Image: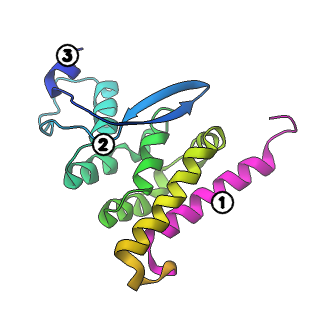
Amino acid sequence: MRLANAIGLVSHDAFAVTVEGEDLSIPARVYFDEVAVRSGYSALHLAILDCLQTRHHSGFVRERAVGRMLSLNTSWSAPFVVQLVSEYVVEILEVIEAGWTQIDERILARFLAENPRFHALVKQRVVSYWNAYYRPLGRQNYVGFKLLNKLDRLALDFACDAPAGE
């Protein structure tokens, strides 16, 4: 509660995902001052804060937060990473691509398998933002498509490796 009070979280929209069978509603955007003083909080509090700050209204705050939270590798942090892939700030996408080796791909693959509609929406957004802002780069050079290809490969590999009936 102390963390929530400290940041004064405000959100108006949300997106829905399922994590380990539990339905979650994650803020689409949050509006609070960036928490710059990180002392006095536990590692778990800071991890949650970083996830929430990936939903911050400022792209600069989102970019700093994702750089810190990529290595969390928890089922509850996966939707925050995947959601960022579907956003238009190319610098954030570049941070994710540069830090991809920190990510436990099995966790993302399980998340994608559990959320096929969300995965489809991420694909649609990547195409839409590329078309609106980055088309001159070409599909092969746009980092959003590079990340989307990684996500698609994870989802396909997970589906192929899953035992029958899952």
Task: Tell me which numbered mark, 1 or 2, is placed earlier along the sequence.
Answer: 2
Mark 3 lies on residue: 2
Question: First in sequence: mark 2 or mark 3?
Answer: 3
Q: Which amino acid does label 1 sit on?
A: Arg
Separation (CA) of disc 1 from disc 2: 25 Å
Please give the residue where the numbered disc 1 appears in the rendered image: 153
Residue at the image position 55 percent from the left and 30 percent from the top: 19
Residue situated in front as seen by the camera: 150 or 8:
8
Secondary structure of the residue carrying numbered label 3: helix
Q: Residues within 10 Å of mark 1 (few under 14, many from 20)?
A: few
Dot 1 falls on a residue whose secondary structure is helix
Mark 3: amino acid = Arg
Give the colour scheme of this rendering.
rainbow
Please state the horizontal and vertical placement of residue 142, each as a whole percent of the image.
Answer: 44, 75
Which residue is identified by label 2? 55
Q: Which of marks 1 and 2 is in front?
A: 2
Q: What stretch is highlighted in magenta?
A: 140-166
Q: Residue furthest right?
A: 164
If the image is split into quadrants, where does the N terminus sit? top left
| Horizontal and vertical percent position of residue 127 | 49, 67
Please identify the residue farthest to the top as the structure is shown. 1
State yes or no: discs 1 and 2 in contact (Cβ < 8 Å): no
Looking at the picture, how far across and down is residue 102, in whole percent?
47, 51
Quarter of the picture holding the C terminus: top right
